[in-house]
Image: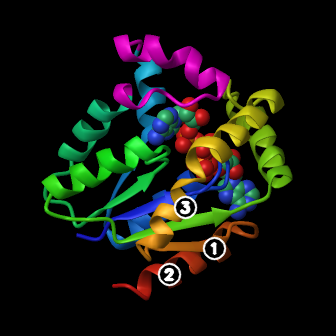
Amino acid sequence: MFNVIMFGPPGSGKGTQSIMVAEKYGLSHISTGDLLRSEVKNGTELGLRVKSILESGELVPDELLIDIFKSAMEKHAGTKGFVFDGFPRTIPQVHDLDQAMAEAKSSISLVICLDVDDEEIISRLLKRAEIQGRKDDTEEVIRNRLSVYQEQTAPLIDFYKEQQKYVCVDGVGSIDDIFSLICGAINRLI
Ligand code: B4P
């Protein structure tokens, strides 16, 4: 299996690029943001618990996430590999993912971080707010999401650097140019 984590701050284009990577390489795409939004939309018990957390830009507690993450993985049993989009975001999630990978007799192959500055992120997400109306795309919540990223998610970079799995690509530019950089990093490994 080939398993890649798409990493980066909110709005860096993880979702956009993950879909393209999954399609090109025949991998299964798991976005924890999409999974959580779908729980909210369907009004499930979990959805009701996490709705206000998503809207505030905070992270959903690790223990609420692991079950939906594992069941999403199970739905793709027999896959050639995964693109993990927005997961892991905390150190406990790194360990949950390692355990899930070990159970699948596999491991993380590559972590690709999209490097985008804060002002570009704010402008992208405010533009998305006009189109999609996501409640977490107001300027105040975006700034909170950026500080949550710095505090809780950015520390994961050192962990994956130590494992020599971490690659950073310039996430500013055209979607196709960024995709080419990502494919270059993947093609060096497969
Ligand atoms: P996510 O759904 O993961 O959302 P995201 O970080 O905002 O977006 P992403 O980086 O995927 O950006 P996108 O491609 O959409 O998380 C939402 C929330 O869910 C979190 O705040 C948290 O509460 C919760 N959550 C999710 N995972 C969790 C976890 N593991 N633990 C705890 N909580 C969790 O791109 C953004 C915009 O930019 C789009 O409009 C796109 O069209 C545009 N864009 C993309 N590439 C571009 C480019 N090159 N140039 C210009 N615009 C571009």
Give residue 20's position: percent from left, percent from top.
49, 64
Residue assigned mark 1: 169
Give residue 189's position: percent from left, percent from top.
38, 85
Quarter of the rendering containing residue 141 = top right
Name the residue nearer the viewer: 85 or 38. 85
3D distance between C-alphas at marks 2 and 3? 17 Å
The magenta span reads 43-64
For residue 33, say whether it is visible: no
Mark in front: 2 vs 3: 3
Name the residue nearer the viewer: 143 or 124. 143
Name the residue rendered at 58%, 79% in the picture: 180
Q: Where residue 80 is drawn, which disc sits there?
A: none
Residue assigned mark 3: 157
User: What scheme was used to colour the molecule?
Assistant: rainbow
Q: For the C terminus, which image quadrant?
A: bottom left
The kind of residue on which mark 2 rests is: Ala
Say if the magenta span includes residue 60.
Answer: yes
Name the residue nearer the viewer: 190 or 100. 100
Mark in front: 1 vs 3: 3
Quarter of the rendering containing residue 92 = top left
In-image side of 93 versus 144 (left or right): left
Give residue 99's position: percent from left, percent from top.
23, 50
The kind of residue on which mark 3 rests is: Ile
The kind of residue on which mark 1 rests is: Val
Say if the magenta span includes residue 48.
Answer: yes
Q: Is residue 49 above or below residue 87?
A: above
Name the residue nearer the viewer: 55 or 145. 145
Give residue 39's position: percent from left, percent from top.
40, 22
Disc tally is 3
The answer to whether marks 1 and 2 mark residues whose Cβ atoms lie closer than 8 Å is yes
Q: Earlier in the sequence, mark 1 or mark 3?
A: 3
Residue assigned mark 2: 185
